[in-house]
Amino acid sequence: MNKKIRKAIIPAAGYGTRFLPATKAQPKEMLPIVDKPIIQYVVEDAVSAGVEDIIIVTGWFKRTIEDHFDYPFELEKRLEESGKYEELEEIRKIANLANFYFVRQKGPLGNATPIWNARDFIGNEPFIVLWGDDFIQASPTRCQQMVKAFEENESSALLASMRLGRPEDYKRYGYAVGEEVRPGLLRATQLVEKPGSNRIKSDYAVISGAVYGPEIFGAIEEAMKRQELENTPKELVYVDAVNILLEQNKSCYALEIKNGKYYDCGNKLEYLKTVVEFGLKHEDLKDEFGSYLKKLKI
């Protein structure tokens, strides 16, 4: 029986070069979706599934992420003195979402490195990995769906997926190949990173999160050893580690997130679309903002 999932890792050490110069002094994960930074949506998703401890893997220029999830005494005092109690309550909720821990990323390039960096915080427990610049809004939440499926299937890895089959999607995402055990759940035999024009017989694009058992750390370590033996420069990616788990006959699944929409805020165009969409949902702004958009002559 899998242990209760209490921990999540959020890699957030990337430079955000696509958004320069805006990200020269501001982490891309802190770019606002109207009035809330991207990474807060990610944290709230994890908390919805019972996560208590969140490990954010950062870099040298990411201090504002730490500050965002801290207690801002001076700001709280000013809001209280100004009688802005609604804003004060909102600010206090952020620090109380979870227990936050911060680790500086070090090691080879690649999206498996921040997972490896957080191994001492995780110990011998299953955990969630969510990326700091994208999220899925779903009901039940993405993390609730992932945790439920992970626990039901006694898996070593369960990857969040969306069903994407356009030619351009195979150039952007990794894919899980295997056999469906039920609608929306695929037992993987292989993960293929960005197959491109060599399209595969699968539309399970693995994006935006995963649940892992602690055995993933041994698989990442094995991937590092293989790279050293090959002596060829290569990024350390989680896809290689999951494929090693599959070599070891471990159970790995891809789960289609139901009733969900994926928001890729690491892409400029998709980020702008997200801001507009959430602006049109915002209680204080939607009517006036909607009227403004209708008047634009584009």
Image (tube, rainbow, N blue to C red):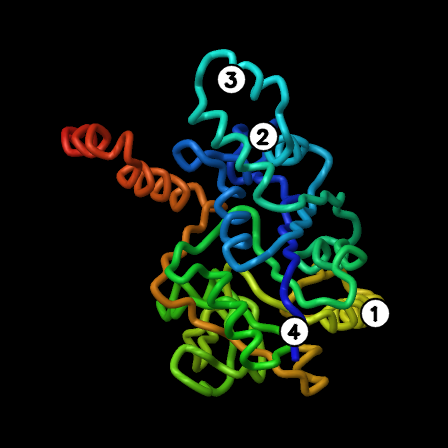
Left or right? Give the position of 225 relative to 257: right
Distance, label 4 to label 2, CA atoms, is: 32 Å
CB atoms of marks 2 and 1 within 8 Å:
no
Return the residue nearer the eye: 151 or 115.
151
Distance, label 4 to label 3, CA atoms, is: 49 Å
Image quarter of the N terminus: bottom right
**Mark 4: secondary structure:** helix
In the picture of the structure, the residue carrying the numbered disc 1 is 225
In the picture of the structure, the residue carrying the numbered disc 3 is 80
Q: Earlier in the sequence, mark 4 or mark 3?
A: 3
In the picture of the structure, the residue carrying the numbered disc 2 is 26
Residue found at x 48% / y 87%: 179
Q: Earlier in the sequence, mark 4 or mark 2?
A: 2
The tag on residue 242 is 4
Q: Quadrant of residue 92?
A: top right
**Mark 1: secondary structure:** helix
Mark 1 or mark 3, which is nearer to you? 3
Return the residue nearer the eye: 5 or 193.
5
The three-letter code of the residue at mark 3 reads: Glu
Left or right? Give the position of 297 relative to 206: left
**Mark 2: secondary structure:** loop
Q: Earlier in the sequence, mark 1 or mark 3?
A: 3
The three-letter code of the residue at mark 2 reads: Gln
Q: Earlier in the sequence, mark 1 or mark 4?
A: 1
Q: Quadrant of residue 230?
A: bottom right
Image quarter of the C terminus: top left
